[in-house]
Amino acid sequence: MTTPTAESALAASDAVLDREETISRDELEALQLSRLQHTVAYAYDRVPLYKRKFDEAGVHPTDLRELSDLGKFPFTTKEDLRLEYPFGMFAVPQHEVARIHASSGTTGRATVVGYTKKDLADWAKLVARSLRASGVRPGMKVHNAYGYGLFTGGMGAHAGAEALGCTVIPISGGQTERQITLIQDFKPDAILATPTYLLTIADAMMKQGIDPASTSLKYAVLGAEPWTEEMRHELEVTMNIKACDIYGLSEVMGPGVAGEAVETQDGSHIWEDHFRPEIIDAFDPSVVLGDGEPGELVFTSLTKEALPIIRYRTKDLTRLLPGTARPAHRRMGRITGRSDDMIILRGVNLFPSQIEEIALRIPELSPHFQLELTRPEGQRMDQLTVKIERRESVTVEGSTTAAKVLQQQIKIHVGSSCTVDVVEPGSLERSNGKLRRIYDLRPKA
Ligand code: DLL
């Protein structure tokens, strides 16, 4: 059998890339400027919200003469999309909208997004580009375990894999036993899923006595939630695959805003011929930060017709890095977390991904954990409890020391005191898609 490394090297060299993937940075920026000028004028003319916001901010589309002028334009937020519910942000008449997706909206109204036929074709092209960068090739069988429906993951990944010329298996999320049967019977080359759902599948295979490293799978393209290098290592070793990142969000398009190259595995390349990224200071949004500096990611669409989006605040925290495998397209660092997913514990900021990173370096502990926030009666201080499963092969006694190590490491690296509760393998809730890591059990004010 060829090793995944040798195969991916081969795969990477035989790919036919889009012309825009190989253009120079100068050519790309010239393209960005002309597309940006068009988009701001198009949004201003067609969407009342943009006209109102630009007028209020005292800017006009003709003020955009160079790329840095984008900083003069107002931001768009999720709240704007909610207020314009359902179709107020659309820039085309309804009969030109070919598809609608929506976010589930855990709080408040859902946000609704729309696509023209051309938007759908561009989206499929960019997902195809991302999958190809991650090692997937025409003719491969692709098991798509992202959820189908209003969520952009399932149908977005599906259209991209089809556009690339793959055989798509549209299983969607959930029904893990059935996923395993189909993986064994259909022998797919690649799997598309959230990282935590792939973990659920691997785990369920082991329970059935199937070695997850023995399947036909060679590539995984994972996203829709934050994950760490440690999780990549865990999945690659357990499943004998190459795992790459794919990033996106509904308001900007869906999956495929950025994708990672299998030959470098050094972060997702933002497809800058279609999106102009910026990093801002989350606490002082008027400050646009330079490449390399951590902050909040902001996107402006450059080609979208149904829902042009200007300076959308993603709340995702990361930084911009120079392009490598696709030199003109900057990469994004791993997303540390979302600013609204940040736990503030006695003044210390903490993200679930930090716990994942630390826990997975302790061999006795599994990647299955959740964070519980409580405020014990009569106390004013919040308490964090990390509930984490020990590995199947480890005894209860063996995990006691591991719990102490985790507690100390969290104190050292994050600065928070917490309680660690090592629990039985299989006792914590498993992911079906985007996993909920934080359980806030504090009394509501
Ligand atoms: O999750 C789109 C998607 C589907 C991306 C499938 C990749 C694969 P939303 O449901 O709108 O869209 O959620 C978007 O998910 O703002 C991030 O916080 C998070 N997210 C998405 N991809 C990644 C990733 C889809 N690769 C929100 N790493 C985003 C970390 C991610 N977080």
Image (cartoon, rainbow, N blue to C red):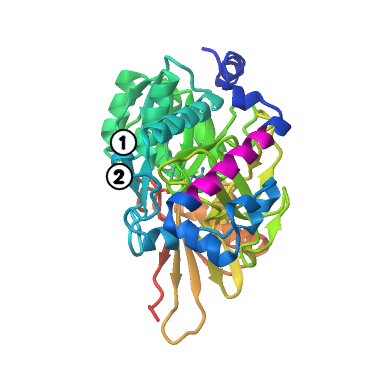
Q: Nearer the viewer, residue 159 or 404?
A: 159
Q: Quadrant of the C terminus?
A: bottom left
Name the kind of residue labelled 1 in the image: Ser
Q: Is residue 119 visible?
A: yes
What residue is at 41 percent from the left and 25 percent from the top?
Answer: 161
Residue highlighted by disc 2? 94
Magenta run includes residue 368: no
Give the alpha-carbon distance from disc 2 to disc 1, as whole Å: 28 Å
The answer to whether 282 is drawn above or below residue 126 in the figure is: below
Q: What mark, if any, has residue 172 been given in the picture? A: 1
Residue type at numbered disc 2? Gln
Is residue 30 on the magenta stretch? yes
Q: Which mark is residue 248?
A: none
Counting from the top left corner in percent of width and height, residue 279 is at 64, 53
Viewer-side residue, 99 vs 248: 99
| Chain part drawn in magenta | 28-43
